[in-house]
Image (tube, rainbow, N blue to C red):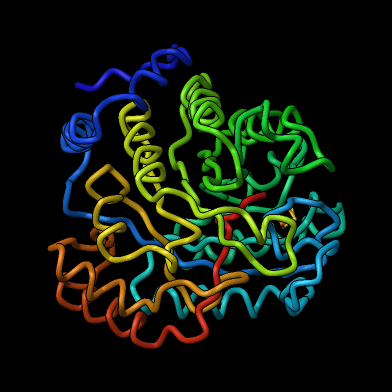
Amino acid sequence: MTTVRTDWTRPEIATLFELPFNDLMFQAQTVHRQNFNPNEVQISTLCSIKTGACPEDCKYCPQSARYDTGLEKEKLMKVEAVLDEARAAKANGATRFCMGAAWRSPKKKDMPYVTSMVRGVKELGLEACMTLGMVSEGQAGELAEAGLDYYNHNLDTSPEYYGEVITTRKYGDRLTTLDNVRSAGMKVCSGGIVGMGEEQKDRIGLLHQLATMPSQPESVPINMLVRVEGTPFAMEEDLDPLDFIRTIAVARIIMPLSQVRLSAGREEMSDEMQAMAFLAGANSIFYGEKLLTTANPGANKDMQLFKRLGINPEKLETEQTEEEQADALMASIESAKNDKFFYDAAQ
Ligand code: SF4
């Protein structure tokens, strides 16, 4: 039985980062095998329910109204339109439907719409996940009451480097939102972004924050910066892919029961790099027709890679046979066009 430690220290995490690469990978894969099927990856579908025109200044994000990235803005989608997307996702084999809105935080007038979306998605028998920016205790309670399973709110980076990335909200604000989500009884999805000019000590600081929460997040997205033209981070230097893989491996070791999600930046990764990320313990990805802002690898390319690696999508809890599920998933993936990318969401 795996013991989850929430008392990790920064020096201990730094020691893991400093391990010889092969030793680190071996340890990560060992922990992974103790807790998960090593040849299974969970797949979620994403829907951007409100795109762009965000008042925040996150320097990596094309959805910020402050940067000219050519992104087409879209108002909050109608509830029925979101549910149509959810029905299609279900028909295509998805088990979890994630809805993201580019907001600083939802307004009072938005809450009836988003809670109706949650109720509708739950009635379809899907798990529901949302990312709407900062939420108060009351809003978290409303979402939980509507049946929301997961709430995503990323920490992005270490507390020390945070000011280089965002100035319009504080690290403490993020922690408060995560506390509100947890207190309301929802599962937490929280991670960060690698490649924003931060140093290894910042990756250590980020993982330390996540791993030492009283309850570790159930889902930990690790994004690789997508350098979108028009954003302040467009000219960031190339990230050493091995530094990214190390971050995944350390996350897997110190958060042994969390799903580590390979998120933004996958389209810039080679098949070999993605394979190495799965070996390091990543066991969740997104695919979908309606993701946010930049290209995701074509979904059928994902399935080809899965096939080459002998990886199966996590089993779906439906009345469909496994064969039907596989066919449905393949059909969905084949039909995924105009993939865009969601920062999963780097809110
Ligand atoms: S990451 Fe989220 S909060 Fe920040 S600018 Fe983008 S949409 Fe807004």
| Residue 89 found in image quarter | bottom left
Ligand 1 found in image quarter? bottom right
The answer to which of 65 and 322 lies nearer the viewer is 65
| Residue 100 found in image quarter | bottom right
The answer to which of 155 and 115 lies nearer the viewer is 155
Q: Is residue 92 above or below residue 249?
A: below
| Residue 322 found in image quarter | bottom left
Q: Position of residue 67 (x, y in %)?
A: 81, 65
The answer to which of 236 and 276 lies nearer the viewer is 236
- Residue at 49% from the left image edge and 27% from the top image edge: 204
Q: Is residue 223 above or below residue 304?
A: above
- Residue at 81% from the left image edge and 71% from the top image edge: 68
**Residue 54 shown left or right of residue 250 in the figure:** right
**Residue 222 shown left or right of residue 202 in the figure:** left
Q: Which quadrant of the figure contains the N terminus?
A: top left
- Residue at 70% from the left image edge and 35% from the top image edge: 162
Q: Position of residue 262 (x, y in %)?
A: 40, 53
**Residue 279 shown left or right of residue 236 in the figure:** left
